[in-house]
Image: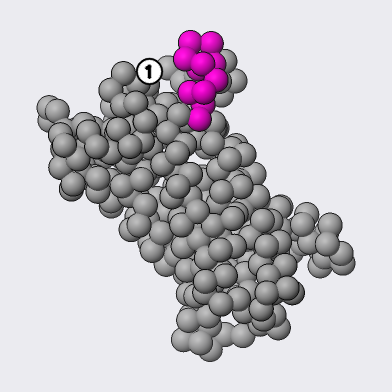
Amino acid sequence: MVASSEKELPFGLQLTCGAIAGVVEILALYPLDVIKTRAQLSSGASVGVVSSFKEIVKTEGARTLYRGIAFPLSVEAPKRAITFAANEQFTVMYKKLFGLEHVTPSLALATGVSAGITEAAVIVPFELVKVRLQDKANAHIYKNAADALKKILQKEGVFALYNGLEATVLRHAIWNGGYFSVISSVKEVLPEAKNKNEQLRNNFMAGTFGGIFGTMLNAPTDVVKSRIQSHMGEGPRKYNWTFPSIIAIGKEEGIRSLYRGFVPKVLRLGPGGGILLVVYDTVSTWMKKHVV
C-alpha cells in the first residue's frame, strides 16, 4: 500500500483513513450482509439474492435490511482502521526484516494475514451480536444491538461473546491475505495511472479483484463462523471448531452448503473491496498533501 518514495502517514492517521473507508463501505453495502447471513444460517433450498431481498422487504419491511447495523457500524470504523493501519505497520516491519525495497505479492500475503489476525481478535464480540440480530429466528428475542448484548451476557455469560473466535481468526486471516496479495499482483499488471481518474480506476479494479478472491477463499470459514455464533447456549452445540464443522456440513448438506450466501457476500465484498481501497488511498493521499 505504501510506496517507498511516498511519505508515510503516522499510525494515528492510518487508523483514521481505515476508519473512514470502513464506514463508507458498510453504509453502501450492508443489506447484502444481512441476506448473506440469512442464507448461511439456512439448511434448506438456496434462494437467490433478488428473491431474498424482495421477501425481506415484503414480509419484514425495508428497515430489516439494516437490522443490526448499529453494532457493526460502531465497530466497522475501528475494524477497518486496524485492518489498514496494521497492514501498513506489518509492511514496514516485514520489509525491514526481509530486506525488501518494494511490496511483493508474497510480502502482501504475509502482511495481510498478520493484519487479519490482529483485526479478528478485536471484533469477535461484535460479529456475534451482528449474527444474532440478522438471524430471522431471533427477531422476537432481541430489540436492538444493546438489548442483544445485555441478554447474551445475562443468559450465556461474557465468554459466549467469544464463541467462534477460532473461525473468525481464520476467516479474517484468509480474506485479508487474499485481498492484499491480489491487490499487489493486479497493480503490477495494470497500466500505470497517468491521472487521478486512472488511479481511482486501478485502485477500484485491484480492490474488487482482491475482495472477490478473498471471498472465494474464506467462504467455508464464514459459513461455519455464522453457524457457531448463532448457537444460543440451549441444547447440544453442533458446531464448535472450524475444520470438523466444515467436514460435518459438507457430509450432511453437501459441499455447496459451504458456499451458502456466497453470491450476496461476493457482491458486497468484491465491490466493497474496491470501495475500501479507493477511499483509503484517496483519504490517505489527501492527508499526505495537507496534514503531514
Q: Residues within 10 Å of mark 1 (few under 14, many from 20)?
A: few
Query: Picture coordinates of residue 96 (x, y %)?
Result: 51, 87
Taking the spot 29% from the left edge, 33% from the top edge, the residue there is: 148
Q: Is residue 61 magenta?
A: yes
Is 4 drawn above or below residue 232 in the view shown? below
Query: Picture coordinates of residue 260 (x, y %)?
Result: 44, 30
- Residue closer to the observer: 179 or 121: 121
Is 96 drawn above or below residue 127 in the view shown? below
Query: Picture coordinates of residue 253 (x, y %)?
Result: 33, 26
Rendering quarter of residue 258: top left
- Residue closer to the observer: 223 or 92: 92
**Would you say residue 224 is visible in this rendering?**
no
Is 281 drawn above or below residue 233 in the view shown? below
Amino acid type at circle 1 is Gly
Q: Label 1 belongs to which residue?
A: 44
Is 112 drawn above or below residue 213 in the view shown? below
What range is drawn magenta here? 56-66
Taking the spot 56% from the left edge, 69% from the top edge, the residue there is: 14
Taking the spot 14% from the left edge, 28% from the top edge, the residue there is: 234
User: Going by the image, does 111 lie left or right of 105?
Assistant: left
User: Going by the image, does 268 lie left or right of 123?
Assistant: right
User: What quarter of the picture does the N terminus occupy?
Assistant: bottom right
